[in-house]
Image (cartoon, rainbow, N blue to C red):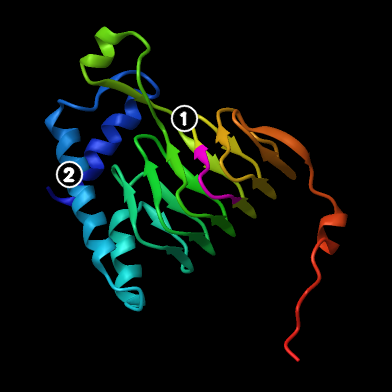
Amino acid sequence: MTNDKRLAAVKMIAEADGRLYDANFDPRITEAVSECKELCYDYNQLRPKQYAERTAQLRTIVGSMGEAATIVSPFWCDYGANIHLGENFYANHGLVILDGAPVTFGHDVYIAPNCVFSTAGHPFDTERRNEGLEYALPITVGDNVWIGMGVMVCPGVTIGSDVVIGAGSVVTRDIPSGVVAVGNPCRVLREITEADTARYERWERG
């Protein structure tokens, strides 16, 4: 499959706009997913110090990315073309993005190991679910966000800027800017204040 065909499959899903589409048996979609998995596989085989090669391969996977964007292997996604990474994006091991709809990250976003961002959902009724139907809703993450290890972000969620999401959280609803949010389902714990600037003493080499 050429990249143009992969993009065409992604565009077809985008036009569904939250409506059900055939994710499991439509050959255009299954071929696009297979092609993306091949690209991810190649990315995951590159050695850690192959910096230039890793950056070049990542650009073949995602829709757009800043000059300084890093994803530590292993990394898996469904289509790739719906993923948009801002400047100074960093994701640790085990990132999974199911990007049937756009997944957009702002600048200075830090993601801890083993996090999942899933735009995909399935019908509750077994008949349509067993037909292979699913829907996709976009995920948006603002600037200056730290997402703790093992966080899962569900379809349709927007996370504001200047946010910390606690480890193990399941984010099922929008999170406003300037807060710490934790839990399952994830809820706002408190605002981030000036006191947080003095929370840790800085170590200086002697």
Q: Is residue 94 left or right of residue 4?
A: right
The residue wearing badge 1 is: 155
Label 1, secondary structure: give it. Answer: loop
On screen, residue 90 above or below 150: below
Name which residue type carries label 2.
Ser
On residue 34, the disc is 2
Observer-nearest residue: 148 or 136?
148
Q: Position of residue 61 (x, y in %)?
A: 30, 55
Which residue is located at x 65 percent, y 35 percent? 175
Q: Is residue 164 left or right of residue 116?
A: right
User: Farthest residue in the right direction?
Assistant: 195
* SS category of the residue bearing label 2: helix
Horizontally, residue 25 falls left or right of residue 173, namely left
Q: Residues within 10 Å of mark 1 (few under 14, many from 20)?
A: many
Taking the magenta stretch, the answer to whether it contains residue 54 is no
Dot 2, crowdedness within 10 Å: few (<14), some or many (≥20)? some
x and y, in percent, of residue 69 in the image: 46, 64
Q: Is residue 110 left or right of residue 50?
A: right
The region drawn magenta spans 147-152
The amino acid type of the residue labelled 1 equals Pro
Q: Is residue 36 depicted above or below 11 in this figure?
A: below
Query: Disc 1 and disc 2: Cα gap in Å?
Result: 22 Å
Depicted 144 relative to depicted 201: above or below: above
Q: Quadrant of the C terminus?
A: bottom right
